[in-house]
Image (cartoon, rainbow, N blue to C red):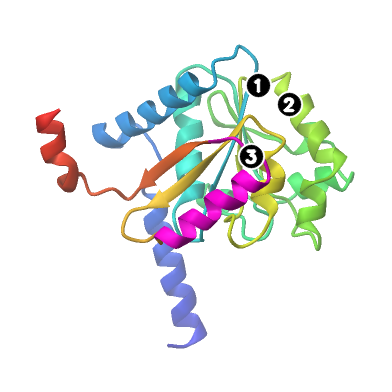
Amino acid sequence: MNNEQVNKKGQSSFMNVRRHILNKNSSFVMKEAYKTLRTNIRFFLRTEACKRICITSAASGEGKSITLLNLAISIAEAGQKVLLIDADMRRPALARLLVEKAAPGLSNVLANITPAEEVIRTGLYPNLDILFSGDAPPNPSELLSSEGMEKLIADMSKRYDYILVDTPPVNVVSDACLVANLLDGVLLLVRQGYSRKDAVKRAVSSLQLTGANLLGFVLNGADLLDVKPYFNYN
């Protein structure tokens, strides 16, 4: 397979993923799944202050970015003001999912090049603002662990009801652990039939070792036919 064929295959796969972005035509089951996740987060974080959460996974390809995007849309639909931040500056996905330009964005803000107010995108969804990843930096870990990131979260917490942050897979780089310690909690995404048990255990250990507040797991790609008997039973 040549490079052109590989690129076309990748683009086709990504377009297929985009079809799963939450919208008015999404299935009832999909909408209810995100409403349940939204409710569970509200239950675990019983505070009137801004709820600040990041999502990560053990490995790449498990669907964390689109899951977080859909969660942000669902929360915004409930009337809450949401800021979605793409802190995966190594392999950002949110801009591609929404067919938007990734730069300028988070990296430019943390490098003191551009004020956050000038690069936060508004108007894509009601009640949902987005800070894309920005230009690819040579030092993403250093930027995410900087005082600038801490200040950004603190400042934005005064303006939004929720801050949701997309981070790289925890077993690949340390970025997720760095960000999680600035927030109220972290969600670990697990994909049915894809995630490896040993990898998930290692991810949990890494998050716990750094003191992150693991709120729970999000199961992605679940086969509802497998759980149907349990719905009938209970």
Q: Which residue is mark 2?
A: 156
Q: Which residues are magenta?
A: 197-214
Note whether residue 68 is visible. Answer: yes
Looking at the image, is mark 3 or mark 1 nearer the viewer?
Answer: 3
Mark 1 or mark 3, which is nearer the start of the sequence?
1
Quadrant in which the N terminus appears: bottom left
Q: Are marks 2 and 3 in contact (CB under 8 Å)?
A: no
Q: Which residue is mark 1?
A: 160
CA separation in Å, label 2 and label 3: 20 Å
Q: Tell me residue 103's x, y (percent).
A: 72, 51
Determine the residue located farthest toward the top in the rendered image: 48
Element under label 3?
A: loop
Q: Magenta stretch containing residue 205, yes or no?
A: yes
Q: Tell me residue 115's x, y (percent).
A: 84, 36
Q: Tell me residue 212's x, y (percent).
A: 63, 39
Q: For this view, does 95 lie left or right of residue 64?
A: right
CA separation in Å, label 2 and label 1: 6 Å
Three-letter code for the amino acid on which mark 1 is drawn: Tyr
Residue at 64% of width from left, 20% of height from top?
Answer: 50
Which image quadrant is residue 119 in?
A: top right
Quadrant in which the C terminus appears: top left
Three-letter code for the amino acid on which mark 2 is drawn: Met
Q: For this view, does 129 lie left or right of residue 30?
A: right
Determine the residue located farthest toward the right in the rendered image: 112
Mark 3 or mark 2, which is nearer the start of the sequence?
2
Q: Which mark is residue 212?
A: 3
Asked if 214 appears above or below 17 in the picture, the reply is: above
